[in-house]
Amino acid sequence: MKNYKYLLFDLDDTILDFGAAENRALEFVLESQRVDNSPGLYDRYKAINQAHWEMLERNELTKDRALAKRHEVFFGELGRSVDGAFINEMYMTQIAEHGHRMFDGALDVLRILSEAFPLYIITNGVKATQEKRLANAGINPYFQDVFISEDTGFQKPMKEFFEHVAACIDGFTPGDALIIGDSLTSDILGGINSGIDTCWYNPDAKENPFGFKADFEIRQLNELFRILGR
Ligand SMILES: [Mg+2]
């Protein structure tokens, strides 16, 4: 068993239930445009959103453009022409104000691990939104520091994001750290790009369609105790 010294946690869909937050925010913006919510719409939004984050990860769109365009594309499919930046503003406010529901058991895992390890957040997102959600969730005390892509100027899986993290943590060496996250394309690939071990949080037992693998895979966060020898 490897002795890890630093734990880097993704936030969305690893600790906080981002799906629930998105669902609620989407409902709100649909209503604002007088579009009835219907089965399948949320899944369609999620696919469009994911595609736009991947374009951002590949540097094909700026962040502002990606965030606005996802709504333009989504509402475009529903036959509505919208101001994406305006819709996004509304959407992000909903996420910031209400998007802090935590997964069952996550709080206990953070509390227990924080007694033995320095914990850090590594998240792709908008600074104001993520900070508000962390504060609302009441979990800031468990973390030594929070790294948000908007702040660092780079996003996961870019090597530069993790170089920034490394430079900010005293004594950090990539070989002593473990990344825990739900996203193969940002968390796991980011770790591989940066020489940091990775643990894929995969509660729904999704297939991994990529040609790379995490060092560990877990269905529940409390499986971390076994990996970390606690
Ligand atoms: Mg995530």
Image: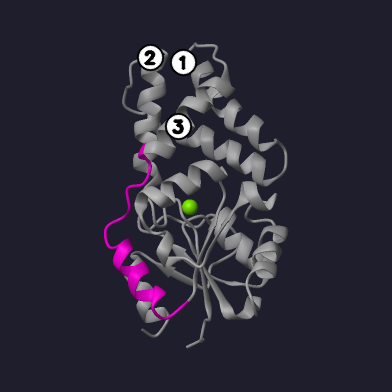
Stretch in magenta: 98-117
Q: Can residue 41 be seen at all in this image of the molecule?
A: no
- The answer to whether the residues at label 1 and label 2 have Cβ atoms under 8 Å apart is yes
When asked about the image quadrant of residue 81, the answer is top right
Q: Earlier in the sequence, mark 1 or mark 2?
A: 2
When asked about the image quadrant of residue 193, the answer is bottom right
**Residue hosting label 2:** 35
In the depicted view, which residue is nearer to us: 17 or 226? 17
Mark 1 or 2: the one toward you: 2
In the depicted view, which residue is nearer to us: 69 or 165? 165
Mark 2, secondary structure of its residue? loop
Could you say which disc has been placed on residue 78 in the image? 1
Q: Earlier in the sequence, mark 2 or mark 3?
A: 2
Is 42 placed left or right of 89 in the picture?
left
Which residue corresponds to the image point at 46% horizontal and 78% vertical from the top-left? 117
Q: Is mark 1 within 8 Å of ligand 1?
A: no
User: Which residue type carries mark 1?
Assistant: Leu
Mark 1 or 3: the one toward you: 3
Which residue corresponds to the image point at 51% horizontal and 22% vertical from the top-left? 87
**Residue hosting label 3:** 93
Q: Can residue 205 be seen at all in this image of the molecule?
A: yes
Q: Is mark 2 within 8 Å of ligand 1?
A: no
User: Which residue type carries mark 3?
Assistant: Thr
Mark 3, secondary structure of its residue? helix
Q: Which colour assignment does the render follow? A: one colour
